[in-house]
Image (cartoon, grey):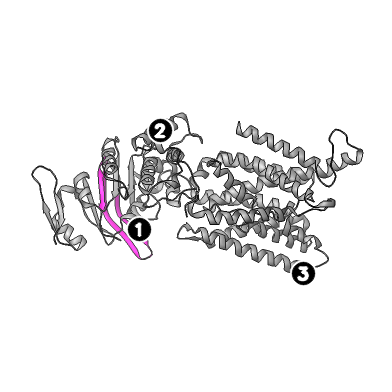
Amino acid sequence: MEVIKIKNFRVKRKNFSLSIKKLNINSSQVIAICGPNGSGKSTFLSALAGLLSFSGEYFLFNTSFLNLDFNLKYKLLGYLPQETKQHLPFDVFYTVLTGRYPVLNKKRYSKKDLKETEKILKIFGLWELRNREFTELSGGEKKRVLLARIFNRNPKIVLLDEPFNQLDLYYQLQLINLFKNFRNLTVLAVIHDIQLAIRYFEKVAFLKNGTLVYFDSSKNISETLISKLYNIPVKIVNPPEENSSYFYIVK
Amino acid sequence: MKTLINLLLLFIIFLLSITKGAVSLNLFHLSPIQKEILISVRIPRVILSAEVGSALVIAGTLFQYVLQNPLADSFTTGASSASALGAVIAIALGLTQLLLPFALAFSLMSLILVYKLASFKGKLSPVTVLLAGIIISTFSSAAISLIKFLSQDSVTSIVFWLMGGFQNASFTKDLILFVILIIVFLRLYKIALAIDILSFDEQTAISSGVNVYFLRKELLFHGALLTAVCVAFSGIIGFVGLIIPHILRLLKHYQARSLFVQGIISGASFMMLADLLSRILLKGGEELPVGVLTSTIGGIFFMYLLVQKKSSLYEW
């Protein structure tokens, strides 16, 4: 089933425009969005999250995005911007609890909300930090809190802008496993580490100058594609004991 | 439990406030004149001071959420001075019955101006918020002085607007502010969870399912309303809406709901105490304008916050 369908999708910003002719994303896919700096990755994600106006067609679960109820949108979608600020302080527990705001029925957090929050905090290794102030945390800890906050609403699609940034290796791997363990979860993540994309993501979307230049299985990425995209010579190797390939930069 | 202690404290301060002052009253032995003082002067005044304290704290908290700035309150955003300017213009034009609408219109205009000046590409710069507030404050104060200069005889009481005080209290004013305070409080209590999410940057707040632009407008309106009524009844009283929420946050009251509840109680206590001090500090029954008192305390506190900001609770 297609969870996201896009046709003639255009987003205009001051000195930049993004245009994607066609893109269909199936349920439960884990997709990396890659590309050079300024290629429109963040613009694309935040437009999908409904934060930028766009022209063209955008269907979410076969309903036009513009016709979706405001509350329903963010029940389905979890969006992590590149940088999140908390201007007035909260403790970690409450910060993560607020991630459930879109799925609330009444205007009060219930016992179930608290329980789910406890569960997700433990998954992200944050239970010990629950009473600390968010603003006091380190960069990596903040990132984990924000990820836990997004996943706490049990979204169907997550749009993550550089989620691995600032995470140590342990939590990077944990996040990848989480993508697979969440039922029916579709992931679109902007990442810079192509190795990570090839090894752990089913599909990769490459953007350059605001257009989609590649959207296919991560297995089919070639030397020439990477070399052309980033203007650097790369070579590919396939270690026999691994089922995925590695790139290295030719000196 | 804590709330109970705070309420008890509030009651004790209330009792102190109605008995102490230029004339000390013993509640159990009242002469007819003392009774008159208590009922028609002391009690309305103390109630007004309590309500203004609560209202200013609520308004300050709201401005902090909307402008994403812990240093925002009715005074630092310029809303108080703008309200005072509105009130003074109404008086100068001889439209005293329109004093409240004028004050409200001016405080709304000033807040919209601050919001527009400080927002750039959907982000609010904390420094620009304060600068815009200073501009509006200074401009309004200058305009008030000018009006005072031009119409010397008709507006001799204009100094009152600049310094603030509860001399003109009455039960009618008490009732008006009480009704507004209750209505605003009930509404805010209901939408408190959404208000909390305004603490986050715009992108995060919107994608958490909160209609940020609408909510900000609503909160600005509530804040402007509370500020305008306070200024119309008691002049400019600065910094209360800044000090109390900050202390509450230091005491780990982070959520809007608890900030509102505790803010109402402690704002009332603080203001009654400040007014009591202003009545008894000077010998011989003379009064210190309460605005002078709170601004002095607040100024020192504000300076402390600015010095502290690097290692503080807040992200900049």
Q: Residue B138 occupies which quadrant of the picture?
A: bottom right
Look at the magenta stretch and give its main secondary structure.
Answer: strand
Q: Is residue B12 above or below residue B78?
A: above
A251 sits left or right of B262 in the view: left
Residue B117: give x, y in percent of width and height.
54, 63
Give the CA separation, mark 2 to mark 1: 39 Å
Front residue of A46 and B300: B300
Give the extent of the magenta segment: A6-33
Q: Nearer the viewer, mark 2 or mark 1?
A: 2
- Residue linked to disc 2: A118
- Residue linked to disc 1: A11
B245 sits left or right of B148 in the view: left
Q: Chain of mark 2?
A: A
Report if residue A64 is visible in the image: no
Residue B310: give x, y in percent of width and height.
48, 54
Q: Which mark is residue B149?
A: 3
- Asked if the magenta segment contains residue A21, the reply would be yes
